[in-house]
Amino acid sequence: MSKDGGDKVPAARIVRCPSCGKSTRYDATNPDRPFCSDRCRTMDIAHWADEGYRIPLKPENSDSDHEVKRHVDDEDEGY
């Protein structure tokens, strides 16, 4: 190592665990990242499995530009 500190290890990024809110390291030394522990990670996946989390959907009538409309030619009308 040099005396000028050129071989410093970068500081770990600290984040809050999404499950319990505890401060935890977000780097390779934490295999459960972004969670603080295996318990919190397991609780989160169980919450997803129980459909406790939901991804919001847009209301069906909010945007009519994405509707698929079929155009009928004169030849197709005689089914």
Image (cartoon, rainbow, N blue to C red):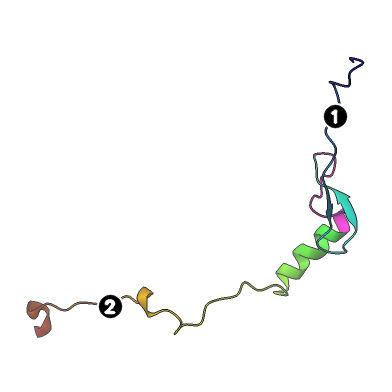
Specify the segment rendered in magenta: 28-39
Q: Residues within 10 Å of mark 1 (few under 14, many from 20)?
A: few
From the image, tell me which residue sits under label 2.
69
Which of pointers 2 and 1 lies earlier in the amino acid sequence? 1
Q: Is residue 29 left or right of residue 60?
A: right
Above or below: residue 79 compared with residue 44:
below
Q: If the image is split into quadrants, where does the C terminus sit?
A: bottom left
From the image, tell me which residue sits under label 1.
9
Tell me the mark number nearer the camera, choosing from 2 and 1: 1
Residue at left 11%, top 79%?
76
Above or below: residue 20 compared with residue 72:
above
Q: Amino acid at mark 2?
A: Lys
Residue at left 78%, top 64%?
44
Query: Image quarter for residue 68?
Result: bottom left
Is residue 79 visible from the viewing direction of this image?
no
- Measure the C-alpha gap from mark 2 to mark 1: 59 Å
Q: Tell which residue pokes out farthest to the top in this image.
A: 2
